[in-house]
Image (spheres, grey):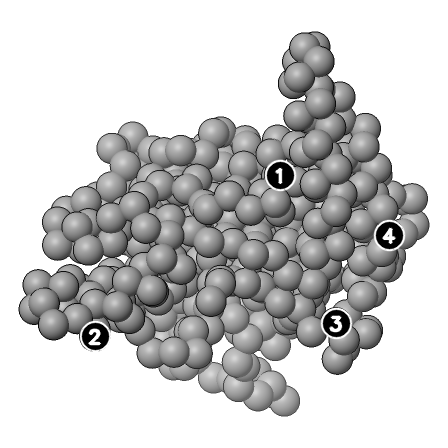
Amino acid sequence: MRMRKISPRSQRPDLDLYCVKWIPWKGERTPIITQSTNGPCPLLAIMNILFLQWKVKLPPQKEMITSDELLTHLGNCLLSIKPQEKSEDLQLNFQQNVDDAMTVLPKLATGLDVNVRFTGVSDFEYTPECSIFDLLGIPLYHGWLVDPQSPEAVSAVGKLSYNQLVEKIITCKHSSDPNLVTEGLIAEQFLETTAAQLTYHGLCELTATAKEDELSVFFRNNHFSTMTKHKSHLYLLVTDQGFLQEEQVVWESLHNVDGDSCFCDSDFHLSHSLGKHQGAEGGGSSPEKQLQVDQDYLIALSLQQQQPQGMLGLSDLELAQQLQQEEYQQQQAVQTRAPAPQGRGATSGRPAGERRQRSKPDSDCVLL
């Protein structure tokens, strides 16, 4: 049993073709690759980093790209890397790593074996696929950590990987030792209550570990995302194909374990583009109201940056989201009292700048 992201290419050949979205990035028009629901996210997450680093470039008018083209670009990048060490032994070892990476390269287009350890955001069981991240200098992170303030869980989970912990739970369940049975139940409860694969402790550690402006790959819920850290806050690259035409939707904030987030543009400014269709229907907010939403959000970000990492900073950001929600509720109350414009119906679009509520995981789970 392994944690794995699998793309059913054999059943859906059309998934081999992906739309290119062009965004302004640090003053340069830069491509990123979007994906449908079951796209090969390990390959896309890595390639989007190489595009954002301008290590790979596409023709200016490129609108579609295949997975084979992406793999060719990635292979060329790997082959162009030169060993930093000059000793013969280290050069041979480097060449072996490149050969291993080239061998497992095709797996990126179908799936990637990843086995996390719950002790650190960079802790994974080493597999040949990991050599690709190492060679490219791309950090691979996760936020599925056991909270050190829960000593029973720390003891039950230990330094085991996900696969090892599942095996331990099965073994403990069939043990005649009541202590082992209890330990197995505690370990099982940890997996159940952290089924979203991100804990508050993990989020804090992730924020502290990631470097400013660093581009990395973030693993969660069998999905690989391109991640960056900007002004001490984490953001995930929005690659959903549904946002292909939304030029102001580029990044999505990562500041909560329950999936609430805010969309931002390529300069990390809160995006209002999602509400533009509502404004066309007469229900949009005024520029003054939108400015107030931005100010509420940025004040909370500033407070979080000034305070130590932890629950207090997260609560400030939650407060900003609550301010946003209250602002829109007041807006809607005023609009309800006012007579509706002639010929206009009720609108159901998302208010500009409102936080995004992600869909819940398929399994019911209790989040830490």
| Dot 1 amino acid type | Ser
Q: Which residue is labeled 1 in the image?
A: 131
What amino acid is labelled 3 in the image? Arg
Element type at mark 2: loop
Upstream in sequence: badge 2 or badge 3:
3
Marked residue nearer the N-terminal end (2 or 4)? 4
Near mark 4 (Cα within 10 A), the count class, few <14, some 14-19 or many ≥20, is few
Q: Is residue 167 above or below residue 137?
A: below
The residue carrying mark 2 is 174
Query: In the rendered view, would you say 17 is above or below 339?
Result: above
Mark earlier in primary sequence (4, 3)? 3
SS type, badge 1: helix
* Residue in view at x 49 percent, y 29 percent: 212
Q: Residue furthest top?
A: 86
| First of labels 4, 1 by sequence position | 4
- Residue situated in front as seen by the camera: 315 or 229: 229
